Image: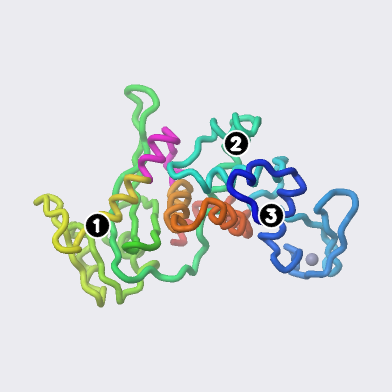
Amino acid sequence: MAHGQAELKRLSEDEARSLLEAIRWPNGPVCPFCSSTQFVNLKSRAGLRHCKECRKQYTVTVGTVMERSRVKMWQWVYVFAAMAASKKGISSHQLSRELGVQYKTAYFMCQRARYAMCHGPDLPKLSGTLEMDETYVGGKPRNPGEVREKMPVVVLLERGGRARGLVTCDVTANTLRKHVTTNADMSSRFMTDESPLYKTTGKKFAGGHETVTHSQREYARGDAHSNTAESYFSLLKRGVYGTYHHVSPEHLHLYVAEFDFKWNFRKVTDTERAHEVMRMVEGKRLYYRTPKAIQAGK
Ligand SMILES: [Zn+2]
């Protein structure tokens, strides 16, 4: 079970299946349809089980982002490991070469891995000293003269802690307020730039609202700064522009989820981060089909 980062990319099909099973089912297989732990191993295919309660058949991929794909399990583990380890993101072209699969397949796997990295609802609120900032991402034209749409991305993050990025349709006081009320513990200290958009929301923080006036080059007055939010954005942009070259507006939220995930797990080893992705593959199948709904639900 103790695979290093490099070994995760060299697993046999059986080893990859065992690893995924051990991570998804630490206490033994659980039926994804009825949650029963009563099963029989079927001999027709490795990893195939028959549920004694609901009588359905399942493998470790049922109910996960890996479901109904012809991709091998070792290839999934490879992609999870490669994506978890890359600081700036990894391109589907590179993965396609490394895995010997078509670009289309590699792209599909990367998008599924990003879905796995999306967090679910009901997360613990962010607290302490919080920074919030907004920027515009995407839309680098591939050909001269081509116009591409940039999308607003808002980030709320804990200084020295977790981050929640959000792709939005607009940058209004209302949109920013919603992101704050969903994600912030209101006893926190709140740090933003001097934008009037944060004024009303800022007043609700028991820890106070401090602003930095970028226009006057007052970047850091004491510890009133939003430098953490700025590093978050520079990392995100380096990935979007440097590695992915182009991200369409409708897929940008997946890249933001990938960067949030890496930011939030930056203090663990690459192997632990890869295991975390494998832990998050469950229950994402529905999300994959309704990305718009998740966005709207935020
Ligand atoms: Zn069952």
Residue 243 within the segment the image draws in magenta: yes
Of marks 1 and 3, which one's residue comes earlier in the chain? 3
Q: Secondary structure at mark 3?
A: helix
Name the outermost residue toward the top.
Answer: 144
Q: Please state if 196 lies on the left or on the right of 56 as rendered.
A: left
Q: Position of residue 199 (x, y in %)?
A: 20, 65
Q: Position of residue 260 (x, y in %)?
A: 43, 54
Callout 2 amino acid: Ala
Badge 3 density bin: few <14, some 14–19, many ≥20, Cα 10 Å? many
**Which dot marks residue 199?**
none
Of marks 1 and 2, which one's residue comes earlier in the chain? 2
Badge 1 density bin: few <14, some 14–19, many ≥20, Cα 10 Å? many
Q: Position of residue 211 (x, y in %)?
A: 17, 62
Name the outermost residue toward the right.
Answer: 43
Badge 2 density bin: few <14, some 14–19, many ≥20, Cα 10 Å? many
Distance of label 1 from label 3 (alpha carbons):
39 Å
**Which dot marks residue 20?**
3
Residue 131 within the segment the image draws in magenta: no
Disc number lying in front (2 or 3): 3
**Which dot marks residue 106?**
2
- The correct choice, above or below, for 251 with respect to 40 in the image is above
* Quadrant of the drawing holding the C terminus: bottom left
Residue at 52 percent across and 62 percent down: it is 120
- The correct choice, above or below, for 109 with respect to 292 in the image is above
Residue at 59 percent across and 29 percent down: it is 97
Callout 3 amino acid: Leu
Q: Which residues are magenta?
A: 236-252
Quarter of the rendered image showing ligand 1: bottom right
* Main SS, magenta residues: helix
The residue identified by callout 1 is 226
